[in-house]
Image (tube, grey):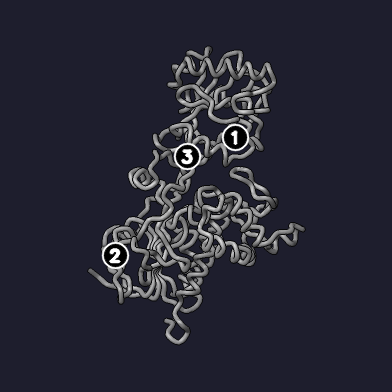
Amino acid sequence: MPTQQYDLVIIGAGTGGIPCAVEAAGRGARVLLVEKDGRVGGTLHTTGGHLSAGGTRRQRERGIEDSVAAHLADIERISGGTARADLVELAARNAPETVDWLEDHGFAFAPESPRLVYGHEPYGVARTYYGKDAGLSILAVLKRLLDEQVEAGRVELWLSSTAIGLVEAPGTAPTVTVLRGGVEEVEVRTAALVLATGGFAADVELFEEIEGVPLVSAAHPTSTGDGLVIAREAGAAIAGRGRYLPTFGGLPHPTTPGKAYFEERPLLVAAERPPWEIYVDRAGRRFVAEDEPSIDLKERALAAATDGTFWTVFDDAARRNSVPMVVGWSPEDVLAKAGTRAGVHRADTLAELAALTGIDPAGLAATVDRYNAAVAAGHDAEFGRTHLPAPIAAGPFFAMENHAITLVTFSGVDVDGHLRVRRTDGRAMEGVYALGEIIGAAATCGNSFCGGMLVTPALTFGRLLGRRLAPAPATATA
């Protein structure tokens, strides 16, 4: 097997891997950056690219008072103290500099950001930033900086190449085996190895083994857990089990079972659209107040009270008057897609609707009767819903199938406060580090979704590690 040697090897050319390579190479390291895809960027090709930071230059320019301490307090509130305090503090204290750094390098902010975002539990102040082109705006900055280092000969980039083995032993530098170009196995030795391969929400078996729930995925297709697999085989511990939380509701993919199509996102956040519909499970039962303002509470109710599948049920009056129900859909689109788009159903009666969807017909009928009685009384005794605009009374009736969907994975490779991978006995591996989604969303979000606390820590930890792992100036390779 051919053998090669580098100062630093990074597996994964995405949100965390690219800035790690750029910072290390800029300080004189000879870097190998390995990417399984045929292009760099990873999940930046699909993510909204939300960032969060308290006390940035952009906030000050817009008169927004914020601070690192306020950001940390909000994360504590949203996560209920379930995130790693050391990693959260490391990320939040360096986040303002990361956002300012992106701006210094021409990041194209969406003009309305920073703002409050309600897709998950909102912060108490406008501190969520994103680009005009979502994750691609971040990638535009990172790729330009990476191209400079590649052209200068300080970073070697292997695309369409997968890390398939890792050897780490006390007193020796780590060695990683890479299937280069999908055809040749190469043994790569390095003083330091950084795993930045992302999560595993595109691998059904690995997801169900580690997270312990069925997978309906809207994750990037390369998120198959390669780095986690080789780290675990080398003795790494897995952290974050039991912290999984689904994203609330997504339509099934029109052609691919087991996946969700996030581009057609149902508007299920009360702040975005007061609901006219009810949510029911397979038994036809409601499980939460549909107008509950906290999306976090709705996500927890979905996880606790259902098998992950539910339907929004409504009548023709709701279709005509509550708009839009799905991003980009008009009331006429709902009508046109019923019976043709996977997961969208229409029937003249509730009994026929139940037969089409697989919902228990008696349960659905009883639930609609109780809901209509609540509308008539102006009070929902079951769940405390206050927005009761109209009964579900006149056909045709509609149901949209929704799933608890997975965009990110909460479990991941365990690391210490210096981002060194830890073995199952708690000992840090020598020269092996990890950052980004491979360490699990639970590390910086806990059992919650904290806006921007995946992308921002990945960028921040990548930059910090790149600086730290570059060779000392006297030994750096030109």
In this rendering, position of residue 364 left or right of residue 226: right
Q: In the rendered view, would you say 420 is above or below 274?
A: below
Q: Mark 2 falls on what kind of element?
A: strand
Q: Give the CA separation, mark 1 to mark 3.
A: 14 Å
222 sits left or right of 170 in the view: right
Label 3 crowding class (10 Å Cα cut-off): few <14, some 14-19, many 20+?
many
User: Contact, CB < 8 Å: mark 3 with mark 2?
Assistant: no
Residue under label 2: 177
Which residue is pictured at 49% across the width and 29% down the height?
310
Reply above or below: 31 against 298: below
- Which type of secondary structure does the marked residue at label 3 adopt? loop
Q: Nearer the viewer, residue 442 or 27?
A: 442
Q: Is residue 162 above or below residue 243?
A: below
- Decide which of tag 1 and tag 2 comes sooner along the chain: 2
Q: Which residue is mark 3?
A: 405
Mark 1, Cα crowd under 10 Å, few <14 / some 14-19 / many 20+, is many
> Which is in the foreground here, disc 3 or disc 2?
3
| Disc 1/disc 2 C-alpha distance (Å) | 45 Å
Relative to 19, is 333 above or below?
above
The residue wearing badge 1 is: 267
Location of the N terminus by quadrant is: bottom left
Q: Are marks 1 and 3 in contact (CB under 8 Å)?
A: no
Q: Residues within 10 Å of mark 2 (few under 14, many from 20)?
A: many
